[in-house]
Amino acid sequence: MALSGNFSLQDVYDEFHPLYAQKGMRWMYERIIGTPSSGGKLSDFSGYGSPSVTRTGDSADPESITVNIDVTTNGTTTYVRLQANPDYDPSIIETGSWVSKSNGSTTVTLSGLEDDTTYSYRIQYYNSFGTSTYYEQSSAYSQATQQGTLDAPSIRNTISYSALNGYDIEWDTTGPEPTGFSIEYRVNGGSWSGVNNITNKVNWGSGTDPKSADIVTGQLPNPFDFFEFRMRATRSGYTTSAYSNIRGYQH
């Protein structure tokens, strides 16, 4: 077996010193056997070599994709990340951070994605014995993020009424900021109906609470009528929220 380069006793000491051995083994290997391009395999030397990563499934939520993988490190810690692009524009590249993985089943996640969007992704990985990034496969997998669902609003118990402006209602929101609200009312426990008009909208879509509005129901109240209100939050690209709590006004 021919040597492809000269090295000293100090080189040998450094290569096998515990502080250097894991990263230096490749250089030692290449001096003795040669580079992979000359026919040697990284895994031929002392069990160190390129890792193996196998995809076993994936899942998604409104803003991320998580991929299940099996990892074989071949002697060193393996670093893994996801890289993806939305199918509507392949020029947009979303890249996750490198995370270290040991042998066995694990997951890797790419966050900060658009909801309700289909992405093509690939798995990148490397270890300290490798000089470049390896790919789990050559053609990317595809996964769609889910559509986000808005949180239900919470109506405050501060409803007031005037013959001029109707019912003034205040409410709070959590989670992704809604840009609209659908409001319904009922009288004396009857069926729910949509309101006639919503005016004086305050803090809609602003991220500030409370939101408020004046509600005109289209039905004049009689003495002792009990009007109740509920609402749902809306926003383009999101699933409309569940109904809020119910608050009432006694005439």
Image (cartoon, grey):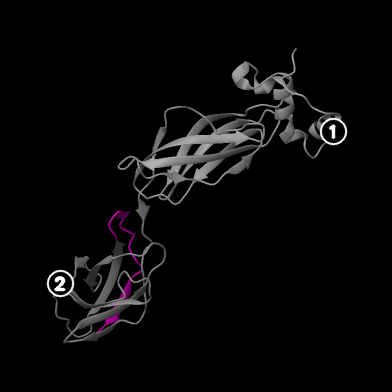
- Residue, disc 2: 196
Identity of the residue drawn at 63% across and 31% down: 130
The amino acid at mark 1 is: Gln
Q: In the rendered image, which quarter is residue 166 located in?
A: bottom left
User: Looking at this view, is 11 or 111 the one in front?
Assistant: 11
The percent position of residue 186, horizontal first and vertical second, equals 23, 70
Residue placed farthest to the front in the image? 6
Under mark 2, the amino acid is: Asn
Quadrant in the rendering for residue 184: bottom left
Q: Residue visible at 38% across and 62% down?
A: 176
Residues in magenta?
235-251
The quadrant in which the C terminus is found is bottom left
**Tags 2 and 1 in contact by the CB under 8 Å rule?**
no
| Numbered circles on residues, count | 2
Whichever of labels 2 and 1 marks the residue nearer the N terminus, that label is 1
* Secondary structure beneath label 2: loop
Q: Where is residue 94 in the image (x, y as percent from the top left)?
A: 43, 46
Is 94 displayed left or right of 69 in the figure? left
Q: Decide which of 6, 109 is in the foreground and name it.
A: 6
Q: Main secondary structure of the magenta part?
A: loop
Question: Could you tell me which secondary element the residue under label 1 belongs to?
Answer: helix
Instruction: Answer left or right for 165 relative to 142.
Output: left
- Residue under pointer 1: 10
Residue 242 vs residue 203, the one in the foreground: 203
